[in-house]
Image (spheres, rainbow, N blue to C red):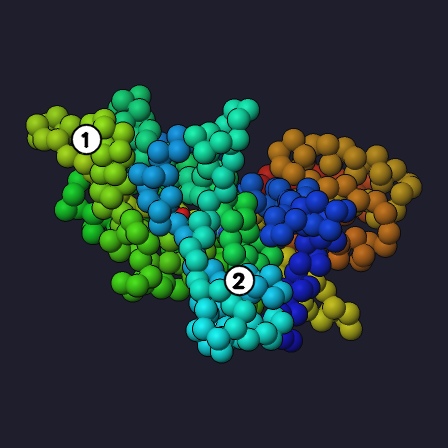
Amino acid sequence: MADTTVMDKLVSLCKRRGFVFQSSEIYGGLGSVWDYGPLGVELKRNVKDRWWRAMVHERDDIEGLDAAILMHPKVWEASGHVSGFTDPLVDCRQCKNRFRADDPRLKGTPGAPDAQCPVCGSRGTLTEPRLFNLMFKTFMGPVEEQAAVIYLRPETAQGIYVNYLNVLQGSRQRVPFGIAQIGKAFRNEITPGNFIFRTREFEQMEMQFFVKPGTDAEWFERWREWRMAWHHSLGLAPEKLRWHEHGPTELAHYARAAYDIEYEFPFGWNEIEGVHNRGDFDLGRHQEHSGKKIEYFDQPANERYLPFIVETSAGADRVTLTVLVDAYREEQVEGETRVVLGFHPALAPIKAAVLPLVKKDGMPEVATRVYDDLRKRFPCFYDDSGAIGRRYRRMDEAGTPFCITIDGDTLTAHTVTVRHRDSMQQDRVAIDQLQRHLEAALTA
Ligand code: GAP
């Protein structure tokens, strides 16, 4: 099976089952912007909840933050995004297509007479590369003038930097400590694509860890280890995860050292998270541009300094795509293809489906009672339509780890069957033990 086929099948499954839809589809869609449907929103939310738990709730040295998307325009001058967050672009004067200057399809040197457009084939029509800023601009207030320009944030990190002293004061933290945030970011990407991998509107899960200068290399290594362990904890295949170290030409303008966590997608190895040693670049720039002293005062040592920052930055949408790709499998069962999303139970959008075998003989009544009981504890689904085999397959495609069937024996023995998505094995469980049984299995 060709790798692109897997992506095509996954995209189609995501639409059919309500994970992800193209934005504004009835108008022909909006380029590389996606909406999450009922199952997708649960899946992505589980990814984010798991990150928040690992980064904020389970640690006492990290605080949470939710900064606004719109920030003072000077923030982006200080951060280097106004001048440095650019891609060189080439236009074809003939067909009006636009390309990144490093697009391997371009033949010859853009701007030269022999350079050839990869779309219309014209020669000498490609412009010289021009820098294009990836930030989305908008205007604050009623007048659309240069002075009113503000940007949609291209990363959530800056909201953390400009708030670090506020958080310190309110939380009684001391360096080393971190601030974590989940939020939307926007980039006018030139070559978006691969479904929700590279989009123009996306969510980041970022954590900035403030450390004493000189201890940054050590913290950087610790954070590398912890972040890779987190991805393993999602149940992702370990052999599909690897590190990529940024060479000197790849390093972002703020980074002293950077490693990406990469996953082997059907379209190749690609970054899902970056771990960066940002030194004092950001705080130094904000101190300079705002004219405000934002040094940390280490009281016991009677020392003032700008902390160095170790950043961990993951895309919520990219991790969600990784979870989907990693979970997707097809199996042959009794001559039929079974499509399964084998999610880690903690990530599964629906934890259990309740299925009365038939719509009579008192089964729906018992099934409704079981369903009402269980859904107080976790997301459940009730399905009484169609043959039981088809209902199981529908739940396999949704990635539901357990199907609970109410059958004839339920009415006499007060037991149900619990079918396991992966093994398809069925256990007989007493109704009064069901909740405990499922909770144990979901947290195992
Ligand atoms: N604050 C540092 C920063 O933003 P980055 O490497 O540009 O670093 C971090 O982005 C993560 O954000 C990436 O690893 C990726 O998961 C996610 N990301 C970046 N651009 C994205 C896009 N256009 N679409 C989806 N996710 C994106």
Element assignment for label 2: strand
Sequence order check: which comes first, mark 1 or mark 2?
A: 2
Q: Which mark is residue 295?
A: 1
In this rendering, position of residue 338 left or right of residue 327: right
Which residue appears farthest toward the right when viewing the image? Answer: 360
The residue mark sitting in front, 1 or 2, is 2
Instruction: Indicate the secondary structure of the residue bearing disc 1.
Output: loop
> Most extreme residue toward the top, as rendered?
170
State which quadrant residue 379 falls in: top right
Q: Residue at 49% x, 47% y: name it.
A: 187
State whether residue 82 appears in this view: yes
Give how far across and how far down residue 139 sits, in percent: 51, 31
Residue sitting nearer the eye, 86 or 360: 86
State the separation of the CA atoms marked 1 and 2.
45 Å
Is 67 displayed left or right of 318 in the figure?
Answer: left
- Confirm whether residue 404 shows in the render: no
Residue located 45% across and 69% down the image:
111
Q: Which mark is residue 133?
A: none
CB at mark 1 closer than 8 A to ligand 1? no
For residue 394, what is the image quadrant? bottom right
Q: Residue at x 9, y 31 (%)?
A: 303
Foreground of the two, 400 or 79 = 79
User: Relative to residue 132, is residue 367 depicted above or below?
Assistant: above
Q: Splitting the image into 4 quarters, where does residue 393 fall?
A: bottom right
Where does the image place residue 411, in percent across and percent down from the top left? 82, 40
Residue occupied by mark 2:
91
Packing grade of label 2 (10 A; few <14, some 14-19, many >=20) is many
| Vertical comparison of 9 with 296: above or below | below
Describe residue 104's horizontal placement relative to residue 340 as left or right. left
Q: Position of residue 157 (x, y in %)?
A: 37, 40
